[in-house]
Amino acid sequence: MTEDRTPALAENPEADEEPKHQGRKNGLYGDISDELSASMQSGWADTELHGLAPVAQAPYAAERRAKLSAAFPGERLVVPAGNLRVRSNDCDFAFRAASEYVHLTGDQTEDAVLVAEPTGDSGHEFALYLLPRSNRENGEFWLDGHGELWVGRRHSLAEQEQLLGLPARDVRRAAEELTALTADSAVPTRLVRGYDAGLEAALAEALDEDRDAGFKEFLSGLRLVKDEWEVGELRAACDATVKGFTDVVRELGQAVATSERWIEGTFWRRARVEGNDVGYGTIAAAGPHATTLHWVRNDGDVRPGELLLLDAGVETHTLYTADVTRTLPIDGRFSALQRTIYEAVYDAQEAGIAAVKPGARFRDFHEASQRVLAERLLAWGLLDASVYDVEKVLELGLQRRWTLHGTGHMLGLDVHDCAHSRREEHVDALLVPGMVLTVEPGLYFQQDDLTVPEEYRGIGVRIEDDILVTADGNENLSAGLPRRAEDVEAWMASLA
């Protein structure tokens, strides 16, 4: 369930004995005096919060849980948030709760678990298992490395019930209680795997791998159509991302003087100010690095005369992320060849965006974009027009030498959202209002590609926007950033 944070409490949450000291082996303090222990047990104000309003997503999360309950009548469902992971020695990575858990609860607490216990043939009782406030009687709050004086106050179980609209129980009892339930009941149990190894081990006897895979598939598909609250979060993520790109353009001079790291850091600062973090590793790819699709080292030079491919997105406090790419001339003006390549990608994106509408196939925007790029590659002579026409190029996929990736993906709590959903309801499905996806064609001419003229080599261009399917077409949520070449140049000049 969790790492052994408080040994005395792991077996008995009401234990009064003092927990083992969790300090470093070579720490500067030794034994704790009785006087210090007594001092730390008294003189603290009551900070319990009362009359808390539910979090904004609480009613929407309740509707999602109702759909979940209807899909799995008579089955026990277990959705963990995940645990902290060690970065190095006694330092942890920043915690980010599992998207399945966040979507169903609105909570982001580490070690937490959502449990749906069936109430007969249909319906479920939902409960959250959460870590309570740190114990002040036994010293946990200041002796444990994860106690509240070390990592900050957390909500009490009573506070969480007000915020989330769910009964809250002590997570340190979860494995024991769930193990007892699965041992005494023939009720099938499903668990979202990959987030809580301890819980998976405790329930191993009751779990079935195929059943759990189907559960994860359903939860991924449950996120395909966003509700109005989710659309609002994605809109906010895009608005914050526009600010981040603006910050970068204003500071391109410092990036030229330093490296791509300045760009990465500049955008990250905005993400932390406006939201929770970046939604994925920022790609700040200058010059030939732009031809590497997931360039996240961000340690290269930023040189005037070359292009910067910046792929970045702000993740909101509720963990919804934008995903936007712009390719910018570092000195503010495209060269003739850069503009030619850029405009081909722009035209491909325009064709792709136009194909996003209710009733269209999910694949349509990809195919529309790829057709434009194939036409340009033939027109430029990079593909032999005496041998191939556009249809044959697309049939054989020959354009992929320079286009490489698919033209978009679903977007939401994950940057590649709904990735585990069923193909027939995702990539092979029709678009419906409320879906949000990226449209992001690109052309990438590698430095060592001898099939293209030398002047093409090392140029990479991608343009990406976040598109909401509406009742009558689509809306570009990231339209606050210019896309046409002349508009990009004018925007950059205005910020110089």
Image: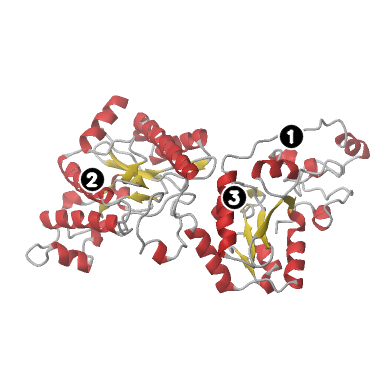
Question: Residue 308 shows which numbered tag?
Answer: none
The quadrant of the picture occupied by the N terminus is: bottom right
Question: Residue 346 shows which numbered tag?
Answer: 2
The quadrant of the picture occupied by the C terminus is: top left
**154 and 271: which one is in front?**
154
| Secondary element type, mark 1 | loop
Pinpoint residue 473: horizontal percent, then vertical percent: 30, 47
Q: Earlier in the sequence, mark 1 or mark 2?
A: 1
Could you tell whether 387 is left or right of 89 in the image? left
**255 and 221: which one is in front?**
221
| Secondary element type, mark 3 | helix
Query: Can you tell which of label 1 and label 2 is closer to the viewer?
Result: 1
Q: Earlier in the sequence, mark 3 or mark 2?
A: 3
Q: Amino acid at mark 1?
A: His
| Secondary element type, mark 2 | helix
Residue at image mark 1: 50
Asked if the residue at tag 1 contacts the one at tag 3, i.e. Cβ–Cβ closer than 8 Å, the answer is no
Which residue is pictured at 33% across the width and 58% down the height? Answer: 362
Task: Work out whether residue 206 can be spotted.
Answer: yes
Q: Around disc 1, counting alpha carbons within 10 Å, would you say few (fewer than 14), some (14 to 19), or many (20 or more)? A: few
Q: Amino acid at mark 3?
A: Ala
How many discs appear? 3
Mark 3–mark 2 distance (CA, rounded to whole Å): 41 Å
Which residue is pictured at 29% across the width and 25% down the height? Answer: 494
Pinpoint residue 406: horizontal percent, then vertical percent: 32, 58
Residue at image mark 3: 62
